[in-house]
Amino acid sequence: MNVEIALPAQAGFGEGPTWDTASSTLLWVDMGACTVHRFDPADGSDTATAFGQPVAAAKPRTGGQGLVLSLRDGVAVTGAAATGAAGTLRWLTDWSSDGVRGNDAAVDGAGRLWVGTIASESSPGRLARIPPRGKPDIAVDGLQISNGIAWSPDTTRMYHVDSPTRRIDVFDYDIDTGRPVNRRVFADVTDTAGVPDGLCTDTDGGVWVALFRGGAIRRYTPGGRLDREIRLPASLTTACGFGGPGLTDLYVTTARRHPGPAEPLAGNLFVVSDAAQGLAPVAFDG
């Protein structure tokens, strides 16, 4: 599989590639720069909106009505014409009182937002469930660095990464209630120098995971067997997601934190064309 530069972004910490079906563009963030980007593969343009604090993930809301953001201090939504000013945000959660920091996020098939946090000295990391309507709650506690979140094509499985454990876990999942149960190891990733970070799934049930400090994307079969590895010219590979008109292009974000002279391409947005068939994206219905 050929890895190409989709956008020479030179991002400090690129994250969260997410296809927005309504606009046929790719959302991604530069976490340290506090910016949300919208990349149009049709013409190569990329526009950025600045926010006042680090943003770890940006997902579309239904009907093109703005975005839902995982920010350092919590989760907030923007209107369709958000400019990034503080007044455009409506906060749904507040992590700041606990000292934890917002991290990766994903939307399940029922339009719920799932968002993870990074532990602080005083509080563990968590995986929170934010329904379209109703009160957010904590679904999984006792985490360190909650990262990649995704579901199987039939939504009966939920995958999750707590990066320092160096594994991908799987839960049985009830899409009607939004309850993950029976947590267990899906794939052990201790055979590489990298740690698992962001992930996504394809229509065959394959699980694709980015290896931070490993410079690669791996695909695991539904049974947890490694069957593919794609090497990238950037060791800080952060996340992956399917996009493009047919959802067959795998976009990969990277970071250039201390990239070193041997990694001039670190921080770019990469694409692997015709990698597999991605699942149809779901917007946050709140």
Image (spheres, grey):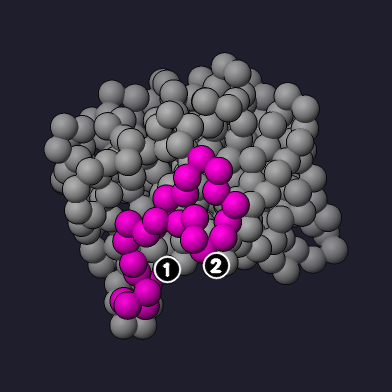
Q: Is residue 95 magenta?
A: yes
Q: Are marks 2 and 1 in contact (CB under 8 Å)?
A: yes
Numbered disc 1: secondary structure: loop
Q: Position of residue 108 (x, y in %)?
A: 32, 36
Separation of marks 2 and 1 at Cα, in angstroms: 8 Å
Numbered disc 2: secondary structure: loop
Viewer can see residue 51: yes
Q: Is residue 149 magenta?
A: no
Q: Nearer the viewer, residue 224 or 41?
A: 41
User: Of label 2 and label 1, which has the lower sequence position?
Assistant: 2
Residue at point 53%, 59% (across, down): 55
Range covered by the magenta-colored residues = 75-101
Residue at point 28%, 23% (across, down): 154
Residue at point 30%, 72% (across, down): 124
Q: Position of residue 48 (x, y in %)?
A: 68, 49
Q: Which residue in the rendered view is the most extreme toward the bottom?
A: 121
Q: Looking at the image, how many numbered discs can be counted on the residues?
A: 2
Q: Position of residue 3 (x, y in %)?
A: 72, 34
Viewer can see residue 234: no
Q: Residues within 10 Å of mark 1 (few under 14, many from 20)?
A: many
Residue named by callout 2: 53
Query: Is 210 left or right of 147, judged from the image as shown?
Result: right
Residue named by callout 1: 73
Q: Position of residue 21 (x, y in %)?
A: 52, 25
Query: Is 84 left or right of 109, judged from the image as shown?
Result: right
Residue 1 lies in quadrant: top right
Disc 2 residue type (three-letter): Gln
Residue at point 79%, 57% (across, down): 263
